[in-house]
Amino acid sequence: MELYQQIFFTTLALSFGILHLIIYVYNKQFKTNLIFAIFLFLFGLSIFFDFQAGLPSTREASLIYLRLHRAVMPYPSLFILLFTYYAFNYKIPKQFWYFIIIIVVAGSFAVLEPNQNFMFLQLAFLMVNVEIIRVFVLAFFNKKQDASIIITGFLILMLFSLYDLFMDFDMISPIYNINNGYPFGFFFLIIFSSIYLARDFARTNKRVLTQEREAKEMEISQKLLEAEDKRKAEELNEARNLQLSLLPQCVTNINNFDICFDMRTASEVGGDYYDYDISESGEISIVIGDATDHGMKAGMMVSIIKSLFLTNVNRMGITDFLNNCSQTIKQMKLKNLYMALMLLKLSDNKLTVSSAGIPPLLIYRKKPNVIEEIKIKGMPLGALNSFPYESIETKLELGDTVLLMTDGLSELFNKEKKSFGFEKVKRVFLKCANEPVTDIANELFSAGEEWLLDCKQNDDITFVVFRFSK
């Protein structure tokens, strides 16, 4: 009977040990399989030597097998304790190393005197079992998944261990000639622990598959977003090209004036606007504007203002034109979308200008070599149905140069969060005011780029520069 038990339990332990070792080899993230496999191999040897010592043989052979059993027997308990730490994702505590020392010392004594010193080994096992129970209690109260499966296996093992303890103290007789009950307890521990590991393996695989599926879905979503972004970028680029086609380029020598228009947008579609028109009498109308925000909404405002400018600028006075545009925009109910605008008219050397929220007009007076600032307050178009806009007249002399601009350059922020400032604009303009009008615009843009360095341009920058040349 004992021979059959020896073969059965030894083969069972080695078979399951090989199985869990193979699982670990093919998936090394599951270290619990490796630890459990080592436990099973050691337990298999312990079972084999334990039964072998009890089989009919010489006294010397039985003693040798008993000592071999005592030499192997202590270490499965260490690995099953280590297994519980890993199974429930607990950090290995300091006392584990004390258990190693205690087990090694107790096992050494048990090898020297297998019967007399066996009690030291039992005390060591008791301490390890107390630690295992502590881990189980923690796992139970922390609601570790499937903790009840391993706990059930250990409870069955303890019942069979109590059976052996009662027999050692002659409290009961062997049942069905079973002199060693603990192998049956370990049989259930092996089965329940393997079930736990299988479920843990399945959960992890399911989680990995879910993560892979989510990663693929994210990749597909990313590609769709990239395609959508590309489509929008192409649409915005087309809108920008359309907007730029509506704006004039640098023009030279129109009715005694050299004129340059230039703009650098902060996004694909800018919110700044500039234009000019010549009446039948030869009067030149020049306009510069800055819509709130930029992008498609601002681009729409630019289109509205251009339409109003081409239709009405030569039919109305400057202030009437501004009020007419403001009333039209407000009636369109564009919510918080407005347009700051400056409109001036040139007739021979007379300049008449009005402003609806645009930065001051700068005039370089060639003979005194100074910058004159014309500041006009006014509400942006679309804010009110009517506003008492003010107009100012002045005379230009030969060589005088005029600069109109939006607030993009003066409010340009560098990496230190400092703005370029209007005074710096005036200094740069004064420095290059005698250069060709196209070079003046380029100098101002270059000063802005030097100020920005690696920072991003946060608003459109637009200049209109013209000089009274004849």
Image (cartoon, rainbow, N blue to C red):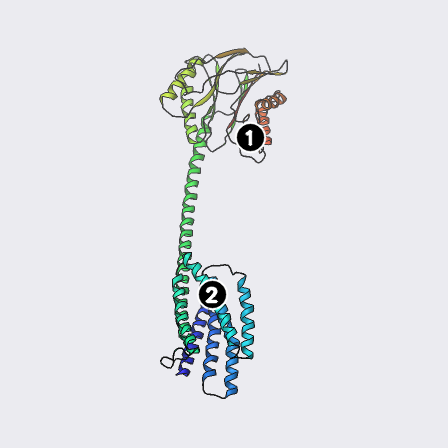
Q: What quarter of the picture does the N terminus occupy?
A: bottom left
Q: In terms of secondary structure, where does tag 2 sit? A: helix
Q: Position of residue 229 (x, y in %)?
A: 43, 40
Depth order, front residue of 84/238: 84
- Residue 130 circle label: 2
Query: For mark 1, does the 10 Å Cα neighbourhood hold few (<14), some (14 to 19), or many (20 or more) residues?
Result: many
At label 1, the amino acid type is Phe
| Mark 2 vs mark 1, CA separation in Å | 68 Å
Earlier sequence position, callout 2 versus callout 1: 2
Q: Is residue 254 visible?
A: yes
Say which residue appears at 40% left-offset and 82% top-offset: 4
Q: Tell me: residue 43, above or below residue 202.
A: below
Q: Tell me: residue 297, above or below residue 368.
A: below
Q: In terms of secondary structure, where does tag 1 sit? A: loop
- Residue 413 circle label: 1
Q: Position of residue 241 (x, y in %)?
A: 45, 32
Q: Position of residue 245 (x, y in %)?
A: 45, 28
Say which residue appears at 45% left-offset and 81% top-offset: 51
Q: How many marks?
A: 2
Query: For mark 2, does the 10 Å Cα neighbourhood hold few (<14), some (14 to 19), or many (20 or more) residues?
Result: few
Residue 395 as seen in the image, left or right of residue 338: right
